Image (spheres, rainbow, N blue to C red):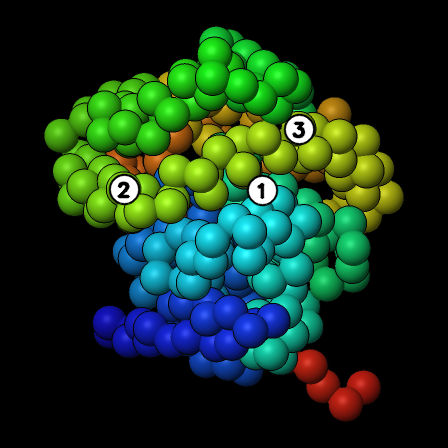
Amino acid sequence: MVHAVHHRTATVNGLEVFYREAGDPKAPAVVLLHGFPTSSHMFRHLIPALADSYHVIAPDHIGFGHSAMPAPEDFPYTFDALTEITSGLLKKLGIDRFAMYVQDYGAPIGWRLAVQAPDRITAIISQNGNAYEEGFVKPFWDGVFAYAKSPGPDTEAPLRAALTPEITRWQYVNGVADPSLVSPDNWVHDQALLDRPGNAEIQLRLFRDYVTNVDLYPQVHQYFRDSQVPLLAVWGAGDEIFGPDGATAFGQDLPAAEIHLLESGHFALESHLETITEYIRDFLARVTAGHSGRRTSAGREA
């Protein structure tokens, strides 16, 4: 049975937020948080694969995908602000408890949600969603942190290069054992959105703010230690943005974390959808049984 995926919008803090939704609203909720430079489009195949058992919500962050893209002078493009919008959307949808799938930018948004309200999070799936400095791969992050420390023409130029078609394609195919499995529609779609007038400045604002995510790591690690939240890492081991050490590092604070390194890259869903789906379904079936998302009155793998 193919489950219908609905494409909806909601107004949060005066801004239109686009989200994809599927599954029974009474089922346990799973929130999918995308990364850069993509959108909920990255979950287009995963959503129906989970919808028979879960209520799946996948929003586009502000400035990405089909969500609103206000000018930087009209919206503070920080990870705190993106988190506030995500939290507002979940409140509007009545999603009180949920498992979350985090990838790239989705991770610092998810970590903020968890630190702010630990009891809301039933489980975490991290697909190249970093929480440890061990995960940063040089030289990619050297450029980001240099720009954040000292914004200017010299430090900005390498970051603008990260917004080009060549680098957008590289993010999809780098580290993938069989790049022919990755549809070029992905980077063509993402690049069209990056090329919208004014979007480059939005992305540069978020690059400059990324250091706040690293500053948050001690609180995230304390949250892990205190909560022992169930965590599954399904990680593209060939990723040259967030390397496999970022996956194994979860074991420092979550000894029971389930960690699988895949022969893929940054967007592992594109080459390993079935494998990742199987891991997620097995994991969630064990750790989220009985969790409704709605408010009530009361080792390396192939």
Left or right: 290 as drawn, with respect to 64? right
Residue 69 left/right relative to 220:
left
Identify the residue at image location x=54%, y=82%: 26
Q: Quadrant of the N terminus?
A: bottom left
Separation (CA) of disc 1 from disc 3: 14 Å
The CA distance from mark 1 to mark 2 is: 24 Å
The relative height of residue 240 versus residue 121 in the rendered view (above or below) is above
In three-dimensional space, the C-alpha distance between marks 2 and 3, rounded to whole angstroms, equals 25 Å
- Residue 214: image location, x then y, percent: 69, 28
Q: Name the residue under label 3.
A: 211
Residue 181 is left or right of residue 274, and the answer is: left
Label 1 belongs to which residue? 107
Q: Quadrant of the C terminus?
A: top left
Q: Which of marks 1 and 2 is in front?
A: 2
Where residue 291 appears, x then y in whole percent? 65, 70
- Left or right of 194, for residue 219: right
Q: Which amino acid, mark 1?
A: Ala
Which quarter of the figure has residue 158?
A: top left
Q: What residue type is labelled 3?
A: Val
Question: Residue 32's spot in the image, x, y percent?
Answer: 48, 56
Nearest to the observer: residue 80 or residue 87: 80
Measuring from the top left, give residue 231's x and y in whole percent: 63, 43
Looking at the image, which is closer to me, 219 or 2?
Answer: 219
Secondary element at image label 2 = loop
Residue at x 33% of width, y 75% of height: 6
Q: Residues within 10 Å of mark 3 (few under 14, many from 20)?
A: some
Q: Which of marks 2 and 3 is nearer the N terminus?
A: 2
Task: Inspect the image, locate mark 2, and give the three-letter code of the amino acid beneath it.
Answer: Asp
Please name the residue that numbered disc 2 is placed on.
195
